[in-house]
Each structure stands twice: as structure tokens, then as C-alpha cells.
């Protein structure tokens, strides 16, 4: 196999591993120290104005994953410490999920975070698949 192709596979494998680690770090940054609570989905909407500026730039799209890529997330209501709260989830959907309104989901609530994290295995499954692909790319001889 040509050296340039092997080098490309190595770099791609390393980049995939970095993405895996960043995905898991982002999820567990919210989950760590949080409380698992039941929440009701109020609606699926564009991320709020407090999350993104009125005219997002290319730089904003690199910082906030909800800018540019559809940017839909759930707005959920839950009770924490005897108070009813409404927060956006840390999701970034490509399209509007209008059929989910009224459903109950479990969310990780951390008072220090402006968003909540839905309890789901989607991140871990995607990270595992990307990790397998990254390892396969690194093992190509």
C-alpha cells in the first residue's frame, strides 16, 4: 500500500479517536454531578436567542453545534428542588421533531449547566462505532 495512503489512514484514525473523546467528554461534562429527573417535552424548537446570536457567523458554528446544522432541540419542563424549570436539551436535530410533544423523557439536570442532557445511549453507540472504525484505520498495514 502506498505510503501516502497509509499516512492518510493514520491521520484519519487519530482524528476519529479525538472526536470520540470529545463527544464523550461533552456528554459527561453535563451528566457528572447531575441529577436524573423525569421531564416532559414541551416542544421542538430552534435554539433560543440566548444560546446563539441573531446573525451567526462561521466562527459561531464552530463553537456552538446548534448553529448551522438545523439547530433544533427539545424544550423540556421538569421539577428540581421543588421548582418547575424549563430548559433546552443539548440535542442538535437536523429537522423539526413535532411528534414528540407531551412525551416524558429522563434528563440529567446540572444546576451549573444552561442545558440538560437527555438520557440515551445514542452518544455511546456512535462513539463505539467511531472507535471501531478508528481502530480499523489505525491497524491497516
Image: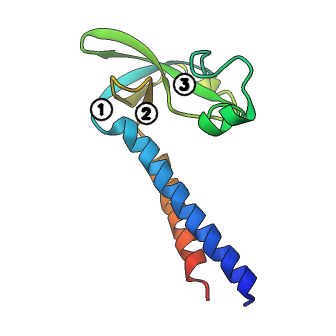
Q: Where is mark 1, residue-wise? A: 34
> How many numbered circles does the render carry?
3
Q: CA distance from mark 1 to mark 2?
A: 9 Å
Residue 39 as seen in the image, left or right of residue 43: left
Q: Where is mark 3, residue-wise? A: 74
| Residue plotted at (59% across, 70% down) | 13
Front-most of residues 86 and 16: 16
Residue 117 bears which disc, if any? 2
Question: Where does residue 7 sit, x and y in percent of width and height?
Answer: 67, 79
Residue 95 as seen in the image, left or right of residue 133: right
Question: Where does residue 29 sit, x and y in percent of width and height?
Answer: 38, 40
Pointer 1 with pointer 2, Cβ within 8 A: yes
Q: Which comes sooner in the sequence, label 3 or label 1?
A: 1
Q: Residues within 10 Å of mark 3 (few under 14, many from 20)?
A: many
Q: Secondary structure at mark 1?
A: loop
The label nearer to you, 3 versus 1, is: 1
| Residue plotted at (54% across, 34% down) | 91
Q: CA distance from mark 2 to mark 3?
A: 10 Å
Q: Residues within 10 Å of mark 1 (few under 14, many from 20)?
A: some
Could you tell me which quadrant the N terminus lies in? bottom right
Amino acid at each position: 500500500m502506498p505510503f501516502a495512503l497509509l499516512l492518510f489512514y493514520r491521520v484519519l484514525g487519530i482524528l476519529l479517536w479525538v472526536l470520540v473523546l470529545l463527544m464523550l467528554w461533552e456528554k459527561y461534562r453535563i451528566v457528572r454531578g447531575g441529577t436524573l429527573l423525569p421531564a416532559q417535552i414541551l416542544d421542538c424548537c430552534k435554539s433560543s436567542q440566548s444560546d446563539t446570536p441573531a446573525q451567526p457567523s462561521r466562527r459561531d458554528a464552530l463553537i456552538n453545534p446548534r448553529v448551522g446544522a438545523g439547530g433544533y432541540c427539545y424544550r423540556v419542563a421538569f421539577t428540581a428542588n421543588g421548582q418547575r424549570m424549563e430548559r433546552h436539551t443539548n440535542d442538535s436535530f437536523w429537522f423539526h421533531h413535532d411528534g414528540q410533544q407531551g412525551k416524558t423523557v429522563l434528563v440529567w439536570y446540572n444546576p451549573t449547566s444552561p442545558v440538560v442532557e437527555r438520557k440515551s445511549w445514542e452518544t455511546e453507540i456512535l462513539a463505539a462505532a467511531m472507535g471501531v472504525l478508528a481502530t480499523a484505520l489505525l491497524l491497516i498495514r
